[in-house]
């Protein structure tokens, strides 16, 4: 298995996402985040290589906006629960620093 380039930190953040050209109001959660991607728990299976826009909700701040590409997915159709791995394809340096700071300050220990 390929080693990650950045450390993943366990953290639960509210996320709104929009598949490019389709908007979805559901509020899935992150499972973990790093500087170059994250894992989401989504109510639907997205196809590999699908590009989506994300707005990561940070309390009392503007959302952190990124675009990502689906790199893996696994889940349970009857439960409507799909873990989805995304690699960031568009993230500003400011957004990356905000995400890193928020994740380090709020990650779930253990």
Image: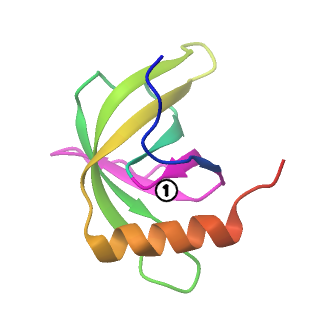
Could one spot residue 33 in this view of the protein?
A: yes
Q: Position of residue 74 (x, y in %)?
A: 51, 17
Quadrant in which residue 41 is drawn: top right
* Res 21 quadrant in image: top left
Q: Is residue 85 left or right of residue 23?
A: right
Query: On the picture, is 28 further left or further right than 18?
Result: right
Can the viewer see residue 27?
A: no
- From the viewer's perspective, tell me whether residue 104 is left or right of residue 74: right
User: Residue 54's spot in the image, x, y percent?
Assistant: 35, 55
Name the residue nearer the viewer: 81 or 99: 99
Q: Residue furthest left?
A: 21
Q: Which residue appears farthest toward the bottom when viewing the image?
A: 60
| Residue placed most toward the observer, 32 or 83 | 32
Name the one closer to the observer, 83 or 1.
1
Image: 100 above or below 84? below
Q: Secondary structure at mark 1?
A: strand
Relative to the observer, which residue lies in front, 78 or 106?
106
Q: From what the image shows, is residue 91 above or below residue 53?
A: below
Count of numbered tags: 1
Q: Position of residue 69 (x, y in %)?
A: 27, 37
Is residue 13 one of those drawn in magenta?
yes
Residue at the image point whose x is 51% and y is 40% from the top: 40
Q: Which residues are magenta?
A: 10-35
Q: Is residue 103 above or below residue 29?
A: below
Give me the residue at 48% from left, 48% from top. 26
The residue pinned by badge 1 equals 15
């Amino acid at each position: 298995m390929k080693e990650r380039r950045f450390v993943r930190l366990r953290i639960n953040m509210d996320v709104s996402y929009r598949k490019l050209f389709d908007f979805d109001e559901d509020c899935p959660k992150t499972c973990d985040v790093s500087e170059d991607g994250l894992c989401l728990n989504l109510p639907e299976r997205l196809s590999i290589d699908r590009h989506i826009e994300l707005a990561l909700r940070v309390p009392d701040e503007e959302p952190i906006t990124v675009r990502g590409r689906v790199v893996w997915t696994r889940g349970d159709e009857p439960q409507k629960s799909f873990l989805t791995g995304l690699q960031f394809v568009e993230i500003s340096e400011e957004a990356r620093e905000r995400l890193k700071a928020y994740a380090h300050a709020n990650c779930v220990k253990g």
